[in-house]
Image (spheres, rainbow, N blue to C red):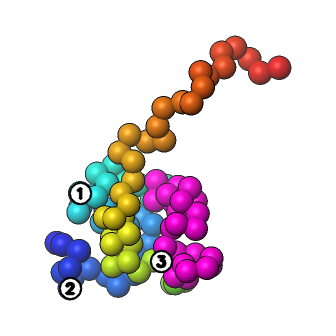
Amino acid sequence: MTADSTDLPKFVTFDQAAALLQHLGIDPTATAQSVRYLARARGERWPFGSGNGQVPYKKIANARTMDTKKLIEYLRAEPPNPHGRGQDKKPRRTGSAP
C-alpha cells in the first residue's frame, strides 16, 4: 500500500490514521493519542480544524475524520519528532512542590 494507491480510504479517524502512519513508515510508533497530540500541539499549522486555512474535520457517526491524502502529504512534509518532545530546557525540580 502506498499513499497514491486507490485502496486508501478517502477519510480516516485518528485511530485509522495511526495505523496508516505506521504502515507507511511515517511514524512507526503512532497511536491515536499521538496523532491527537500532534493536532493539539501544532495548532494552526495542523491542516484540519476550524481555523483560517484549515480543512474542517468531517463528522462520520461519532468520529471526526480527516482527508487521508492531505494528512499523508502534511506528515511527509512535517513528520512527527521521533524522539518525543525533546530535551528539558531547564533541570526538573526534585522533591515535592510547595
Q: CA distance from mark 2 to mark 1?
A: 18 Å
Q: Which residues are magenta?
A: 34-56
Q: Earlier in the sequence, mark 3 or mark 1?
A: 1
Q: Secondary structure at mark 1?
A: loop
- The amino acid at mark 3 is Thr
Amino acid, disc 1? Gly
Q: Are marks 2 and 3 in contact (CB under 8 Å)?
A: no
- Residue 36 on the magenta segment: yes
Residue at 20% of width from left, 79% of height from top?
4
28 vs 42, left or right, is left
Q: Residues within 10 Å of mark 3 (few under 14, many from 20)?
A: many
Q: Which residue is mark 1?
A: 25
Instruction: Give the quarter of the figure containing the N terminus.
Output: bottom left
In the rendering, at what x and y percent does residue 20 appear?
A: 30, 66
Instruction: Report if residue 58 lies within the magenta region.
Output: no
**Furthest residue in direction right, as rendered:** 98
Q: How far separated are the C-alphas under marks 2 and 3?
A: 18 Å
Disc 1 crowd, CA 10 A, few/some/many (<14, 14-19, 20+): few
Numbered disc 2: secondary structure:
loop
Which numbered mark, 3 or 1, is in the foreground of this view? 1
Q: In the displayed orientation, state which residue is furthest to the top.
A: 95
Query: In this orientation, does residue 19 appear?
Result: no
The image's mark for residue 65 is 3
How far across and how far down the image is residue 74, in percent?
38, 69
The x, y position of residue 53, in whole percent, is 55, 80
Q: Residue sitting at 52 percent across and 66 percent down?
A: 45
The residue to which callout 2 is attached is: 6
Residue nearer the viewer, 44 or 9: 44
Q: Quadrant of residue 12?
A: bottom left
Q: Compared to 72, does 52 lie above or below? A: below
